[in-house]
Image (cartoon, grey):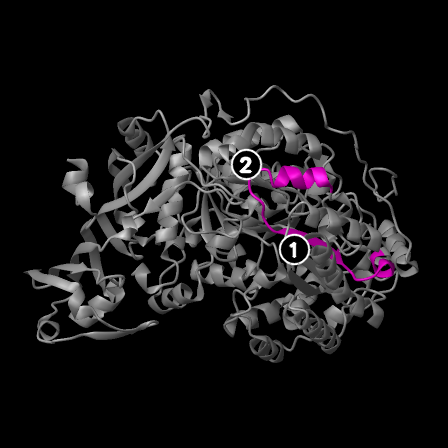
Amino acid sequence: MNLLKFQRPSRYINGEINSIHKKAPVKVALAFPDVYEVGMSHLGLKVLYKIINDMPRASAERFFSPWVDMGDAMKKDGALLSSLESGRPLKEFDIVGFSLQYELAYTTVLDMLSLGGVPLRSEVRLDKKNLPLVIAGGPGALNPYPMSAFIDAFLVGDGEDAVKEIVETYDRWKEGGGTDKSVLLKELSGIEGVYVSSLGRGQRVKRRTISSLEEAPFPVSPVLPFTNIIHDRVNIEISRGCSMGCRFCQAGMTYRPVRERSVAKILELAEASLRNTGYDDISFTSLSSGDYSCLPELMNEFNRRFSGRRIAMSLPSLRVGSVTSGMLKEIRAVRKTGFTIAPEAGTDRLRSVINKDFTEETYLNALEILFKEGWTNLKLYFMTGLPTETDEDISAIPEMAYRAIGISKRLTRRTPTISAGVSSFIPKPHTPFQWFGQNDIELLREKNAYLKKAFLRKGIKFKGHNEEMSLLEAVFSRGDESLAPLIEAAWSEGCRLDAWTEHFDPGRWKKAAEISGVDAFAFAQRTYDKDAVLPWDNIDTGVTKEFLWREYQNAVSGTFTSDCRKTCHACGLKCDQRTICGPIAAGPEAGTHNTVIRPDESTVKSLHLRLQYSKTGKARFLSHLELSASIIRAMKRAEFPLKYSSGFHPAPRISFGPALGVGISGLDEYLDLEVLGPFDPEEGRSSLNGRLPEGIRVIRMVLLPGGEKSLNSFIIRHIYEISCGSPVSADAFLGRETAIVRREKGPVDIKEMVESLERMDEMTFRITVKDCGETRVRLTEIIPEVFGIEPSECGIIRVEVSGWAGRWAGPLEVFG
């Protein structure tokens, strides 16, 4: 397919740094039911990719949902969904493993199976040879029943050990002939944490857990995406599980007990990950990063080792009560970012109901600390529809944001930038609120409309979650096997990528409900009594139903339950709550990288370099931002001593020449950069070429004299070779006196930009174009006017770009 006809072609091109291409007897497809930039942000996918590819008899390849434009084209042309690594269709893999991170991905699972040539229903696949085993894991597996008609087996809990056992079991079955899939499924059911759909509810499945994070596999060489993904940084899980006991939080209940990595191990993983990726940002992730027991030691030592290399750190999940001045000083040591607080509820009373452990006073103290340390951007997150919620609780929510504005003005005399996110509460299985029904959708709309108006009135940005989407999430979170016809009917009606508001269509879901005859929405509002048999009761997370009921009663009475690392509340799990803080092994001095010592910028003169490079092959599908990110990360992996700008957001001092459009190759591209001396350009060129992705190559690199102007400060001349898909003529354009196109600032005559046009054969032309004053050339305007076709229908190569003044007038003078 012509990738230029689709949004973000870099989603589909493969060839990323650190991707693994391997042949093995057992072929595993890691399928994430969302688009590339979402799936590639998921740490769990990266962990499984490493674990499986480390197994000698197994290989793992990646699949993501295509965006709707590509998906429609694939269906029209009959093209099969294939892996990024080898291009093998999904149906030809042995195992297909889906990650069920959210309920609104369920129709996308069906869409990916269909696009990959795999029958949707498990019972159909069971009796057919040469079809993959389809498994799933993630939070969705905690209630497998809505998807059990489509998934052969679910893994409940941690995957690090279990996935190896699943692959090894499949390998033995395949080696033994691999004819009767029911035999395979029976063997899989004997693995702790595995629920086999065809064996039904008679199974009592115990959640799989790993006992320690310390030696757990971790991907220190993750695949480096070309396109900008949601979480485009190094992510290191510093702890798993949470002991705070928020009663609405499924992850907090089901990822117990708390397991932490040591500071020494985290720093070891950080060093290797940064070296292998070239990222300049690292996130220490967990359900509550601020409660990591060695956080001050970790932050202090991380900055001591890495701040000199301009590596910034962030903590994405902080409790209000965990915010300290020292923590904020460490976070802003390199680069200050926005800050997020999740009060969830507006009053102390309701926070006691949900077991959110802070008071109004704690919140105000945290705000004072935040604004005193210089933060001006703040995000606040709230929920509506919580158990026992009153009008007073709702009206108190915007007041929390108003108080933040007041404190900022008092302390800094500045109005902060505040945004508020509001979502509707979804009662989740295996939580104390699993017995509680979701608010009626009209009531949720009323509450959220009130909050939107209240926030916008004070200039606070508001982002609400679609109430129909929340309703469906509750349906599938709390539903059972009877929902399968609804999911399949919705997919048949065109539902997919439902977590994207621009593609979510409640009308299609309503029609699917009519077609399937399933009264699904009753699941959302249904309230259960104490002794009710819940659909997910045979899934044993380790936290007892008796404990959850006690917590539900504590919620109703507004009784707070303390941190279980301080006082055991007998949830059913046996926990080892020993601290993992210990002596930190001596690391490199601040600003060093193994034996490479970064020069002190205040004492070393910087050197100016000009670099000539080419962009060809698959790399032509990269946008200018994607290309620049790939080159800069490669420079960091090559340990270039880059010079940085000053200020709150330091960045490498690199200036790229005229941007190449997506799909255009370039043989004569330029960038300027500053490095700290001493630096050998030829050694730098060789080192950089060894780290660049396929299709990007450095041709030459030379020192520049001081005072040279930016590459973009001159009138630029471009020479392109344009290959059209069929014979075309430019005679009509050449016969015109003018060729006017409309731009934002007014009309532009692009005829003046075309210096020469040479026909090389009946389908190939060489065209020379130049900027007119400050009006830059846009090839997307010129090609339709000259040839009467769209740029996506052409093969375009920029063979030369020039125009720099003085000594550096052209490529031969610069590098000759």
* Residue at (74, 34) in percent of width and height: 293
Residue 425 seen in this snapshot:
no
* Residue at (61, 41) in percent of width and height: 332
672 sits to left or right of 201: left
Q: Position of residue 561 (x, y in %)?
A: 87, 48
Q: Is residue 501 magenta?
A: no
Q: Nearer the viewer, residue 446 or 588?
A: 588
Q: Is residue 280 above or below residue 553?
A: above
Label 1 SS: strand
- How many residues crowd mark 1 within 10 Å: few (<14), some (14–19), many (20+)? many
Residue 622 seen in this snapshot:
yes
Q: Position of residue 160 (x, y in %)?
A: 60, 38
Under mark 2, the amino acid is: Glu
712 sits to left or right of 446: left
- Name the residue carrying label 2: 168
- Name the residue carrying label 1: 378
Q: Which residues are magenta?
A: 324-351
Label 2 SS: helix
